[in-house]
Image: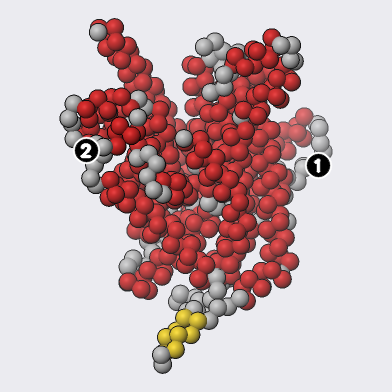
Amino acid sequence: MKGRTSYKMIIVLALGYAFLFGPIVILIVYSFNASKLVTVWGGFSLKWYGELLKDKGILDAFWNSLRIAFCTAGFATALGTIAGYVMARFGRFRGHTTFASTITAPLVMPEVITGLASLLLFVSMERIIGWPQGRGMLTIWIAHVTFATAFVAIIVSSRLRDMDLSIEEAALDLGAPPLKVFFVITLPIIAPALISGWLLAFTLSLDDLVITSFVAGPGSTTLPMKVFSAARLGISPKINAIGTLIVLIASFFIVSFSIISFKMEKKRKREAQQAFENN
Amino acid sequence: MIGKLKKYLPEGRTLVIAIPLVWMLLFFLIPFAIVLKISFSEMMTAIPPFSTLWKYADEMLNVKLNMGNYLFLLTDDLYISAYINSVKMATLSTVFCLLIGYPMAYSIANASPTVRNILLLGIVLPSWTSFLIRIYAWIGILKNNGLFNNFLMGLGVIDQPLIILNTNIAVYIGIVYAYLPFMILPLYTNLVKHDHTLLEAAYDLGARPWKSFLAITIPLSFPGIVAGSMLIFIPVVGEFVIPELLGGSETLMIGRVLWQEFFNNRDWPVASAVAIIMLLLLAIPVAVFHHYQSKEAL
């Protein structure tokens, strides 16, 4: 299909992207500012990155966040894939709309409510069954998995809906057991969706402040909690440096993933075409 | 097609449905029942800081429901104006996002496929990088001696710095900035599927481009508009980070009130009641969202 871009559209897009990217670019530029005054340029310097490496509180918080994000992403991807598969492939079983609404409910829920509700659950559970003991990494992990699963389920189910059912059906007709079909046929095809689900779960977990603040305990301070308490006091070049690192890491992940999945998609299409031509 | 697949589906079908469902019921739905329960209890200086609702002693079940939290919320002006203000700010920000997001989504949908992928990546990229950091970046831009004021004063447009940070204007800027991708993505998904022969037919019949846009494109994109609007309106009503970092004392929003009741006053019952009333307020938008989501999925 040919593009229908007019000069008006180009102006709209230029302004829109300037708005979306401007603040991030400014943040990055000023993280290399030698001056302590964040908005006055005092020459290029890497000193704020050096300061970061010396700040044990921030490093610990970063390490906590990374560990939680890794564990969240893995588990949420597994749980979300199952949920997404049910949503896309199980048809209209009894209560299928209830199922879908329950799984995707965290998508449209203000975080303060989710956070408060999760905390009250953990407190009540501890009182009744004695688990989980206190709040910390475990309770943060459970709360993160819960909302990240909803996002993964949406990504996986929309990918499955776009996917051609005939391959799965062919395998089933040829007598492959359903579980085998799922692992050998379905999973490889939806692999890009699983990777984007994993990445999204990872970044959501790494980034969450509100829910985490409710369910965190002593000794489980995460990076966003550190950044937030510092940002409340005003801006500092050190936070600019953390922000730059986070933005660069996240962009690296997302851009490389996009390129890989774009290439995989192209290759798959080419192979499919070749298969047709050979027959 | 699903029907054909059905006879092959695993015996463990129920199990497959149950695993994610049980997790969500336990960790997402049951907690709301607990919030409801605690909103009827009294605040106490204890751990946890609230009273129990029922006691069983001497063959008597005593249920004590404390309506005080709700009466307190409904009679105190602070809470009522916080609710009204949150809804107002969420509505206005949704409209701003729609006004900015629609032309952008439309332009992306009309670009050639390769350019489209790059443009989409440009929308996804900022929305996947730290929300907190992106809001923080605006503090440096908007403050009195910040970049925006320095720029305007350098140009000689103003002599006195504009006070933007810690006002509602800053909050609107922050909300629109942070939530814009959530409007663009569902709109794009909708607009890119449009059949252009409809528009061409309208042109052939002599309709002006603007008229055909209003009569064809906008109505067809309605599901996208609803999805985007709900994805913004609902979380913004309860937004905490943006009013806290960019807003001032005038920025009264209910998410901030809930946070303060919980963390500063340690009044868990009142915080729970605030959450329950917020949920009631959001029930209709949430239902609309799920209604359109399930329609889209079929």
* Residue B58 appearing in the image: yes
Q: Residue at x 64, y 12 (%)?
A: B200
Of residues A157 and A27, the one nearer the viewer is A157
Q: Residue at x 71, y 25 (%)?
A: B214
Q: Residue at x 71, y 63 (%)?
A: B80
In the rendered image, residue A142, in percent from the top left (x then y), is placed at: 37, 55
The residue that label 2 is drawn on is A179
The residue that label 1 is drawn on is B160
Left or right: B216 in relation to B53: right
In the rendered image, residue B68, in percent from the top left (x then y), is placed at: 62, 76
Rendered view: B135 above or below A112: above
Of residues A111 and B13, the one nearer the viewer is B13
Helix, strand or loop under label 2: helix
In the rendered image, residue A75, in percent from the top left (x then y), is placed at: 32, 47
* Residue A145 appearing in the image: no
In the rendered image, residue A117, in percent from the top left (x then y), is placed at: 48, 62
Left or right: B226 in relation to A135: right
Helix, strand or loop under label 1: loop
Amino acid type indicated by mark 1: Gln
Left or right: A225 in relation to A43: left
Subunit that carries the residue with mark 2:
A
Q: Residue at x 37, y 74 (%)?
A: A127
Mark 1 or 2, closer to the camera: 2
- Location of residue B221 by image quarter: top right
